[in-house]
Amino acid sequence: MALTDPAHALDVLAQNLDDGDLSFDNSGLCQITVQDVFVLNLQKVDARRLRLVTYLDGLVQAMSARFLLNAATANQDGSAGLYSRFGLHKRAGVLCLEELLDVTILDADALEARVLTFTKTAAYWLANADNLFDDENPLEPLVHHTGSGMDDAEFQAYAEFADDMSVIVKA
């Protein structure tokens, strides 16, 4: 049977975790500490959707073009996680891993599997996020060349094309 809303999803998680104290605060946020290592944030987005977010802020270095390209590539090719993606906190610029769930299409078992997969993925990135800063990306020369080799008008034409799925960096 499908879940009805994020509150129902939280009740299911509380039952599975044997933790009756799970609840959303006034802003729609519930936080679960995972093995004293990181915090899993469950944010109620609306009547159907729940956002899973883990901030990888302990790993943040100066954001380089290589880091941003590697994060974007991981999002595109699915290596950020099975259903998750990298993002940046809007105000703080902190790296996060997030996933948006429509809980009304999930049953209790599917919800548990998705949260477990996300948690395992977050644990992996907590241990391996430095790869985003250090690993060379085969697209790096092309992106840098493309962005820096264009005149401003040509760059703007690409940068403003709404259907373009690529990230263009102007050096």
Image: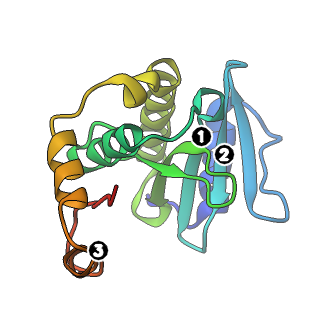
User: Which residue in the protein does label 2 denote?
Assistant: 41
In the image, residue 110 above or below residue 102: above
Q: CA distance from mark 3 to mark 2?
A: 33 Å
Q: Amino acid at mark 3?
A: Ala
Asked which secondary structure carries label 1, the reply is: strand
Q: Residue at x 32, y 45 (%)?
A: 69
Q: Residue at x 45, y 23 (%)?
A: 130
User: Which residue in the protein does label 1 denote?
Assistant: 54
Q: Residue at x 58, y 66 (%)?
A: 5
Badges 1 and 2: C-beta atoms under 8 Å apart? Answer: yes
Q: Amino acid at mark 1?
A: Thr
User: Which residue in the protein does label 3 denote?
Assistant: 159
Which one is in front, 12 or 157? 157
Q: Residue 112: x and y, percent?
A: 49, 39
Query: Sequence order check: which comes first, mark 3 or mark 2?
Result: 2
The answer to which image quadrant residue 1 occupies is bottom left
Query: Sequence order check: which comes first, mark 1 or mark 2?
Result: 2
Asked which secondary structure carries label 3, the reply is: helix
Q: Residue 9: x and y, percent?
A: 59, 54
Asked which secondary structure carries label 2, the reply is: strand
Which one is in front, 54 or 58? 58
Which one is in front, 31 or 13? 31
Q: Amino acid at mark 2?
A: Asn
Residue depth check, mark 1 versus mark 2: number of the one nearer the observer? 1
Query: Sequence order check: which comes first, mark 3 or mark 1?
Result: 1
Total labels: the figure holds 3
Circle 1: is it few (<14), some (14-19), or many (20+) Cα within 10 Å?
Answer: many
